[in-house]
Amino acid sequence: MKLLRAKLDWILLPMIGFGAAIAIWQILSVTVCKELPSPWRTWLESREYILKPFEKRGEMDQGILRFTWYSLILVAKGYALALLVGTPIGFLLGLSVVFTRIFDPIIQVLRPVSPLAWLPLGLVLFLGAGKQASELGALFTIAVCAMWPTVLNTAVGVRAIPQDYLNVARVLKLSRTKTFVKVLIPATLPYMFTGFRLSLGIAWLVIVAAEMLTGRPGVGGFLWQEYNALNYAHIILCILTIGFVGFALDRLMSVVERRFKTA
Amino acid sequence: MAHLELKAVSKGFGDPSQRTEVLHDINLEIKEGEFVAIVGFSGAGKTTLISMIAGLTKPDAGSVLLRGKPVTGPGPDRGIVFQNYSLLPWLTVYENVALAVDQCFPDWDPARRQAHTERYIAMVNLTPAKTKRPSELSGGMRQRVSVARALAMEPEVLLMDEPLGALDALTRATLQDEFARICQETRKTVVLITNDPDEGIYLSDRIIPLSAGPGATLGPSIEVNLERPRDRKALNHLSRFKEIRREVIEYLVASNRKKRVEVSRALVLPDIEPEDLSVPRATFGARKHPIRRSEIKRENVEI
């Protein structure tokens, strides 16, 4: 009985939250803001995109999952770049005091810069790339913005390694490489994965901004185009898609993270 | 020649201006195959002493010699069992021991290394738990893994830093019995650091008290000439056991008393002037507080 109750709560209570949000949306659409499409109108206008999620009717008129797929691919590339660059920097920061003294101030200065500010710079950097410029610029922006949580968490993780583990490595006379592979990396992994999860969240945040400004096909690009075309229902569709995909990505990463936490 | 030798070893910590010497003029000679227990108060510098033998910290003065050669750094010739086990939590029992074996005997073929690893896991009775991770083991089991790892390196000297300090009394007794058996089997040179004189006497050939710090030094070494294997229950009634125990404890207590320092501190006595009740009390506003004629006295306190 109690178990059933707990299960019901688990499904029912979030439903109440969603219901309330939809109710407020409905009320807003009929009272304050007449321009805001009601939930039902949003559904009617978005049906085409949701029910045929992979259809391609034109460059900027495609099923919502197809757009999501484009965005995910770009995010994956930018995120991979962020991890490849961020993890080694994190290790260097954690291991070397001199390195920290040199680079920590500049990291602290660059960290709070918004993706909207990085993107133009990214486009300028890759002006010579011609057609590829927008993609490379977007990749650069995602990588630069998503890198910091990985960098900082890895550094903290390395600094938090118990002296005992290092003593074991010293008594066994492990070489530098072996100490790194057998002790430093496994001991830092839980922290690294926390960083990876936060980085993925940021990468997904950045993609929308990057696509909006570059006009690339994807959820963000679609959102901006539909705003300009006055199809407000589709904006809401995009927001919900971005939200659910972001949520799914975070859940996925926390499952992976938990696997390494026990180690 | 002594197997392990400490010559006039001193070690201090802190800035040069207010440096406190933790260990002062430690001299020790250990024969091959001898089991030496060092007993002392917590905080006396026991861990510092064993870290220096292990080579994890360097002495300020004096030298540590292993077979006449000075110790310059840590190495697998001195296996160490840490108080907090220091197992790598992401490796299984087998992998923790195998890491040490693979590192110490790289030229052996894999089958021989595996057999060697398994032999030491079996020696500490952990074969059934060999695929478990440290987090799934009890404290006593973890310490056994740590012992297996240290012994599997086939060190010349086995160093144990309060190996049973974090365990409950029952597990402690079981593990003491096992240590006694293993040491009997392997005939290793062992240095055991402990804060329990009974444990030291039960396991060792020679027990040495470490005086209370700061500036701790080794006391007279006392030969534990009791028959092996020793029976824990019978031991308590042996007059020689009682004698050794008394000697060790008396030395420790005496060294602690000497170290006591007198400190003088100010004492404020609650000397309150009586309130004058003939004056009517104000109902509102400032209430009269008792007047304190503070009288300061100095008192000497022993700490």
Image (cartoon, coloured by chain):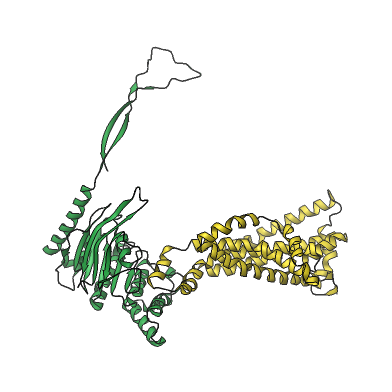
Chain colours: A yellow, B green
Position of residue B220 relative to residue A80, above or below, is above
Q: Is residue B222 left or right of residue B68?
A: left
Say whether residue B176 is visible.
Answer: no
Q: Is residue B248 among what the camera can see?
A: yes
Is A90 left, or right, of A121 in this rendering? left
Q: Quadrant of residue B67?
A: bottom left
Residue drawn at the location 47% of the way across and 74% of the way down: A178
- Residue nearer the viewer, B189 or A174: A174
Name the quadrant of the C terminus of chain B.
top left
How far across and how far down the image is residue A49, in percent? 82, 69
Q: Residue at x 47, y 70 (%)?
A: A183
Image-based side of B93 in relation to B233, left or right: right
- The residue positioned farthest toward the right in the image shown: A229
Q: How many marks?
A: 0
Residue B15's spot in the image, x, y percent?
A: 37, 51
Quadrant of the frame with the N terminus of chain B: bottom left
x, y percent for residue B242: 14, 61
Observer-nearest residue: A50 or A57?
A: A57
Q: Is residue A249 above or below residue B256?
A: below
B129 sits to left or right of A192: left
Q: Is residue B52 above or below residue B127?
A: above
Question: Which residue lies at the image location 86% right of the left edge and 52% below the top edge?
Answer: A34
- In-front residue for pair A31/B265: B265
Residue A6 position in % (x across, y down): 59, 61
